[in-house]
Structure formats: structure tokens, C-alpha cells
Image: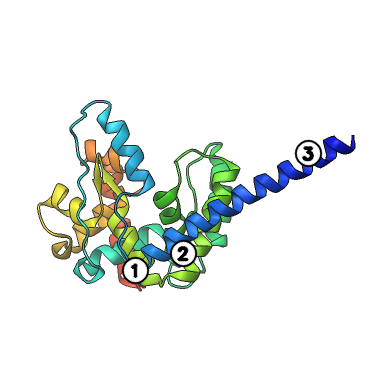
């Protein structure tokens, strides 16, 4: 029994050591990307692998643009649609999460996530889309890293440049050109609101651009944009 207990102890210490090294590895990337623009995120890597099963030559559409070259309309639209308290919270919108849980319980299925922009970015940069308690815990740890080591402006800049906006389309610049044949800087209010409405289900809306639901969401987001506070 003593040998078994000792073996269990060393096994647990080994697992903790691996976990700690993993967190330090993530921390290193977070520190680097605070100053250097990320290339391919984990989510991009996953989507590219899926697309290449059908077309081995396909490439993702993405072009990095600095924060000041992204339309203020798009910034307001994303804040209005995805995270109205972004500039004020420290990574988590507890009230929004509670409302999402209540909505899911009422519908009897998962229809709302309550994730902030910081949480979404944490997942996109490093994690897989699979749902598990471990992934949610890791997402929370990375979110705290981002919130404590990056400015809100940097979090939002990276988010706008790496989120999925269609089938193989990532970032504001590629999305603006893919849907409207303009640059991210040239997006008008309605175009920005429509792009913001696509964020929760971008590949569906890429295929169904005239979906009635998207039109309704666009109108709602337009109405909220004037009060959206951006970093």
C-alpha cells in the first residue's frame, strides 16, 4: 500500500508539472502576441484541415489590418452584438452568463453562450471547439492572461483580425472584401451591422446571405450601435 501511495503521489506531481509547463507555454505565446501579430490560430488550423479534406490546395482568406484601419462602425457593431460591457469587465460578464444559462434552460438546449470577446479570443487562439469542463477551465485561465497582459484595444484588435467570418474567411479585412468588395476601413453602418450579425454562425450565413433572421439581427444591432463603447 505504501508503494502504491508513493506511486500515486509521484503520478499526481508529474501531471501537475505537465499542467504547469503547458500554462507557461501558453503564457509565453500570450506575451509574444501582445507585441507581435499572431499568424495562424488554433481555430484557423482546424478549419484549414477540414477544408483541405475537400480541396488540398485551398488557402484561408485573411489579411491583417491595424486597429486604426478598421471601420469604427464595425467596432461598434461587434461590441453591440457580442459584448456590450467589453470595456468595463475583466474578462467575464457574469450577468450575461447567468442570462445565457437561464435562456438555455428555458429552451431545453444550448442556444446562448454568454462568452465575452476576451473568452472568444482565448478559445480561438489556442483551443479546440469541443465542449468540456477542462476546455472551459483552460479558456478561463487564458482569458485572465489576456486581460492582465494586454490592453482592451489589443484584445479587440486581435479579435477583429482572427475571428471566422465565412467558409475559410477570417478577420475584418477578408470579410469586408468577401461580402462587400471594400476594405475593412470603408465599411458603412449597415454593412458593419450585417457582419456583426454573422459572427455566431458565419459559415451558415456565408451560404445564406439573405436569411430573414440575419436581416432582423442587423436591424437590432444598428439600433444599439450608437451606445456601444469601444476601446
Q: Earlier in the sequence, mark 1 or mark 3?
A: 3
Determine whether the residue tagged by mark 2 lies in a helix, strand or loop.
Answer: helix
Q: Tag 1's secondary structure?
A: loop
* Mark positioned earlier in the residue sequence (2 or 1): 1
Distance between the alpha carbons at the discs numbered 2 and 1: 12 Å
At x 54% / y 45%, what residue is drawn?
135
| Quadrant of the rendered image containing residue 78 | bottom left
Q: Residue furthest top?
A: 54
Task: Between label 2 and label 1, give the one nearer the viewer.
Answer: 1
Q: Is residue 41 left or right of residue 28?
A: left
Nearer to us: label 3 or label 2 = 3
Q: Dot 1: few (<14), some (14–19), or many (≥20) neighbours within 10 Å?
A: few
| Category of crowding for the residue at label 2, using alpha-carbon neighbours closer than 10 angstroms: few (below 14), some (14–19), many (at least 20) | many
Circle on res. 146: 2
Q: How many marks?
A: 3
Counting residues from the start of the chain, the first of labels 3 and 2 encountered is 3
Q: Is residue 100 visible?
A: yes
Q: In the rendering, at what x and y percent does residue 61 appear?
A: 20, 46
Could you say which disc has been placed on residue 166 in the image? none
* SS label for mark 3: helix
For mark 3, what is the residue? Answer: 7
Residue 164 in the image, given as x and y percentages of width and height: 30, 47
Indicate the colouring scheme: rainbow
Residue appearing at x 31%, y 64% in the figure: 36
Quarter residue 80 falls in: bottom left
- CA–CA distance between discs 1 and 3? 43 Å
Q: Residue furthest right?
A: 1
- In which quadrant of the rendered image does the C terminus lie? bottom left
Mark 1 or 3, closer to the camera: 3
The mark found on residue 35 in the picture is 1
Residue 93 lies, in percent from the top left, at 52, 62
Amino acid at each position: 500500500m505504501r508503494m502504491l501511495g508513493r506511486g500515486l503521489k509521484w503520478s499526481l506531481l508529474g501531471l501537475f508539472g505537465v499542467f504547469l509547463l503547458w500554462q507557461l507555454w501558453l503564457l509565453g505565446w500570450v506575451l509574444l502576441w501582445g507585441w507581435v501579430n499572431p499568424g495562424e490560430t488554433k481555430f484557423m488550423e482546424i478549419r484549414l484541415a477540414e477544408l483541405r479534406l475537400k480541396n488540398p490546395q485551398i488557402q484561408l482568406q485573411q489579411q491583417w489590418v491595424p486597429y486604426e484601419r478598421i471601420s469604427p462602425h464595425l467596432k461598434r457593431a461587434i461590441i453591440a452584438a457580442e459584448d456590450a460591457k467589453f470595456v468595463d469587465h475583466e474578462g467575464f460578464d457574469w450577468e450575461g452568463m447567468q442570462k445565457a444559462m437561464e435562456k438555455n434552460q428555458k429552451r431545453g438546449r444550448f442556444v446562448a453562450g454568454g462568452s465575452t470577446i476576451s473568452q472568444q479570443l482565448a478559445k480561438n487562439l489556442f483551443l479546440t471547439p469541443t465542449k468540456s469542463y477542462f476546455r472551459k477551465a483552460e479558456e478561463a485561465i487564458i482569458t485572465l492572461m489576456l486581460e492582465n497582459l494586454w490592453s482592451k484595444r489589443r484584445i479587440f484588435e486581435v479579435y477583429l483580425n482572427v475571428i471566422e467570418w465565412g467558409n475559410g474567411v477570417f478577420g475584418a479585412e477578408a470579410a469586408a472584401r468577401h461580402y462587400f468588395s471594400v476594405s475593412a476601413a470603408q465599411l458603412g453602418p449597415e454593412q458593419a451591422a450585417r457582419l456583426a450579425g454573422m459572427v455566431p454562425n458565419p459559415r451558415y450565413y456565408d451560404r445564406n446571405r439573405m436569411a430573414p433572421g440575419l436581416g432582423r439581427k442587423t436591424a437590432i444591432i444598428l439600433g444599439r450601435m450608437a451606445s456601444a463603447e469601444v476601446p
